[in-house]
Amino acid sequence: MKITEHIKASKGRSLFSFEILPPLKGHNIQGIFDGIDPLMDFKPPFVDVTYHREEYVYIEREKGLLEKRVVRKRPGTVGICAAIQNKYKVDAVPHILCGGFSKEDTENFLIDLDFLGIQNVMALRGDAVKSELYFTPEADGHRYAGELVKQVAGMNEGKFLDEALENGHCTDFCIGVAGYPEKHMEAPSLERDIQNLKAKQEAGAEYIVTQMFFDNERFFQFEQKCRENGITIPIIPGLKPISIKRHLSLIPHRFHVDLPDELIREVEKCGSNKEVQEVGIEWCVQQSKELVAAGVPVLHYYSMGKSKNIKRIAAQVF
Ligand code: FAD
């Protein structure tokens, strides 16, 4: 079922969903199932699976001679999605990227997803690879997520890159995109970022999942600005509980979001990460309850494979 159909069917009740990462190469899928099992009690209609593109590493072949190698540390997105749909009978949402993909790669990737019965995709640009300052698209790839959305929407109308296939099979993907209540780090202003988000809706996006945020006011203001700018599709808030003291610097650095002073003070008071986890859970429960009261369609948790704290939060909210 499509995410938009799940939202419609819920008749105004906020749904529970979460995002997982494929395991590091060399691990089996059992760890993924062990992370999902405890969260199935809260009946998620869908589970997102992130995509991780290649990274460049340098290996010393001989003394002083470095060789550049391309590695993918977390492959397996498609396989995990198929396994989730098969085992749990819930919809799996693979993340698909512009980065590292030519248009032809994307087309073939989408054909695989369609054959596997996957009906939803989250279309993203992806970040710059670690050795580069700015995102660089493939020679025949997409520069922005909006272009990727357009390609998926085109395939939904039977449009393939080879024009001879114009009347080919129409896929039927529901397309999600990312939104940033505190602005995407590269956007010159929140207003411009929201205009670019609206362009993703015009290209065919049907729902938005937000970057994590820790102050609900930022979400409410963002949602209002989106509506004022003609964005009408559902906006799903993304939430992550703080669980270690290092998150105070790591989260703003990696995700370009602010942490409220009150949360920082509470975390700084903690004597151990066990205490930090309690603060993080309590904060996230309060955020979740307020968002549910405001009528958000879904609460989407960034579980990062750690389901214990998400389970404790969900038990108090759903
Ligand atoms: P875009 O929508 O392309 O936006 C990128 C920047 O370009 C923004 O500043 C935007 O304002 C600007 N822009 C957009 N369109 C135009 C245009 N036409 N002209 C000029 N400027 C434009 N990364 C991964 O690698 N794997 C994942 O699985 C993954 N999952 C994610 C899930 C969520 C919910 C979120 C919020 C992020 C996720 N990311 C993931 C990170 C994401 O790839 C990065 O945040 C990336 O930097 C931007 O992706 P985007 O799809 O928002 O890009």
Image (tube, rainbow, N blue to C red):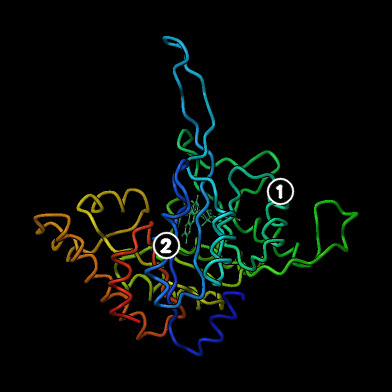
Task: Give the percent coordinates (x, y) of residue 122.
Answer: 56, 62
Amino acid at dot 2: Gln
Task: Give the percent coordinates (x, y) of residue 267.
Answer: 16, 59
Q: Could you say whether the residue bearing mark 1 is in a helix, strand or loop?
A: helix
Q: Nearer the viewer, residue 131 or 53?
A: 53
Residue linked to disc 2:
211
Residue linked to disc 1:
103
> Which of the marked residues, 1 or 2, is nearer the chain's N terminus?
1
x 29%, y 49%: residue: 250
Image label count: 2
Density class for disc 1 (Cα within 10 Å; few <14, some 14-19, many ≥20) is: some
Task: Give the percent coordinates (x, y) of residue 139.
Answer: 68, 38
x 26%, y 60%: residue: 242
State whether label 2 is within 8 Å of ligand 1: yes
Q: Nearer the viewer, residue 262 or 107?
A: 107
Q: In terms of image quadrants, where is residue 301?
A: bottom left
In the image, taking residue 154 as reference, residue 25 lies left or right, namely: left
Q: Nearer the viewer, residue 67 or 163?
A: 67
Quarter of the image with the C terminus is bottom left
Of all residues shown, which one is farthest toward the bottom?
11
Q: Marks 1 and 2, how far apart in space?
A: 26 Å
Task: Give the percent coordinates (x, y) of residue 293.
Answer: 35, 86
Q: Is residue 98 above or below residue 189?
A: above
Q: Nearer the viewer, residue 281 or 265?
A: 281
Q: Could you say whether the residue bearing mark 2 is in a helix, strand or loop?
A: strand
Of all residues shown, which one is farthest toward the right?
164
State whether label 1 is within 8 Å of ligand 1: no
x 62%, y 59%: residue: 146
Quarter of the image with the N terminus is bottom right
